[in-house]
Image (spheres, rainbow, N blue to C red):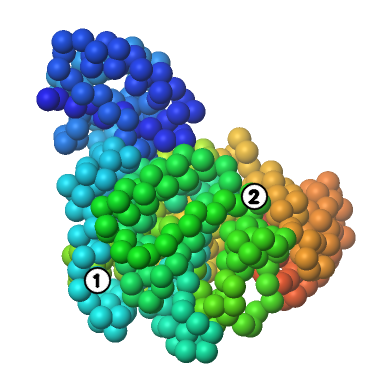
Amino acid sequence: MPRLNVPSGSVGRAVGTLAVLEALRESLAAGDAGIDVVETGSDGVHWAAPVVALHGQEVAAGTAGSDPIAVAESVLAGNGNAEIAEYMHAQDRRLLARAGRIDPMSIDEARDDGAYEGLAKAQALTSAEGMASLEASGLRGRGGAYFPVHLKWQAAIAASALNGQPLLVVNAEEGEPGVFKDRVLMESDPHRLVEGVAIACHAIGAEHAYIYINGQADLSAQHVAQALADASAADLLGGLVVEIRRGAGGYVCGEETVILESIEGRRAVPRLRPPFPTERGLFGRPTVINNVETLANLPDLFRHGSDWFRAVGSEEASGTKLISLSGALSRPGLIEVPMGTTFSEILEIGGAHDLMGAVAGGPSGGLLPSSKFDLAIAPGALDPAGAVLGAGGIVAFDDAFGAAEVLRVQASYNAVESCGKCTPCREGGERLADAIERLGAGDVSARTDIDELVTIMRGASLCGLGQMAVAPVTSALQDFAAEIGVPS
């Protein structure tokens, strides 16, 4: 039976996917057409949503502003959307291989496409063998710090002799504006995350895991809960206990020790370190904290091997990276590209033209001018002035919403999102935002205040929010001085 997939998710539902589904089912599935209509997860083609695609073939068409029945008939006739095809072919879709192609609520569809094969292979290995394979792959965390995953896991295992059996915590908070990769993964292919959790727990010897999901990501929580229930019913998780916990929101909730405080029922503020979570984390036990994208790499890594994983990417960082594209682009959405891809190549996929720059690294990232778009994505600082890859959010901007306004928005956001625990961030963020406003209004003395605040916040803030909140400022001072009011 022919099958029409309608990629959905939070983005699709916001632009009418459910109405398209209903119209197609009433007109096609309920009649004698013999056509199945299935709601799948988002395929990342957010700019064209709602979309109708022919299952198993790269034929798709946007339905925005069109009669969905006419579009469906066109798709069934084999008429594709060339722009969507170009968007897809420019990527290397590993983590997104099933996104938009399967029903995320069906464990059978996921398993037919290879889900849980990696888990079976990982379970056949000893902890040492699994760790060796992980180390050989070169996998680094995808949450922003890009710490080698095997080192974090080994630290928790080493601490277990003193502090008890390790725990796994999945950081699915993703409260950073402009980043939506983990949400798409959970909505579109939740079994990939569940399988990754099971693999990680097997490797570190954990029998209990927590998935900390953003309090607003209801669809993510719903799909992950169903995937956990189905995997457990299929006896794929053994005795592993996995709990979903919901965050209350706030940028600081993405900080790993804040998550631990939140799960334990305390105020969402960062902890002093040391001890580090891998030594003494959740409930005083060694705790590995990995984000969704990191764990989503594990199923294919163990299914296909470390050599396969290293076949793409750079020497410094193997594998692919999910990039959330937004801003002044004609094709915003979620894409997957090899580590080492340049900003210009990434932004071209997003339909970039006449850009002034891009924010790289979220609210605490840097403003990267178009003259530096030849930089390749990589761990650590991409530019000494402040641009980083971070969680993979890239927000493009042009002269319609220029660098000065971008900087004001970032500075204000970072000030508001301070948890208030430490003085440098709590007071410094507000003063820094005010100094930027004064600089833009022509107060040249504000520059001295900015320089002092940058030094204090970077050196004395308790966590990464305050330490990195200065990056938009330092990058703007270097590359957009005239635009933000610095006298020549």
Q: Is residue 245 above or below residue 165?
A: above
Label 1 to label 2: alpha-carbon separation: 35 Å
Q: Position of residue 140 (x, y in %)?
A: 40, 70
Residue count near mark 2 (Cα–Cα under 10 Å), binned few <14, some 14–19, many ≥20: some
Seen from the viewer's position, the closer of residues 316 and 334 is 334
Q: 248 or 368, which lies in front?
A: 248
Q: Splitting the image into 4 quarters, where does residue 39 fall?
A: top left
The residue closer to the viewer here, 313 or 246, is 246
The kind of residue tagged 2 is: Ala
Residue in the picture at 48% in, 57% down? 243
Question: Which of the two marks, 1 or 2, is nearer to us in this view?
Answer: 1
In screen coordinates, is 116 left or right of 482?
A: left
Residue beneath the point at 36% across and 49% down: 229
Query: Circle 1 sits on which residue?
Result: 123
At x 29%, y 84%, the residue is 128
**Residue indicated by mark 2:** 248
Residue 34 visible to the viewer: yes
Q: Position of residue 393 (x, y in %)?
A: 50, 52
Mark 1, other Cα within 10 Å: few <14 / some 14–19 / many ≥20: some
**Residue 315 x/y as whole percent:** 31, 74
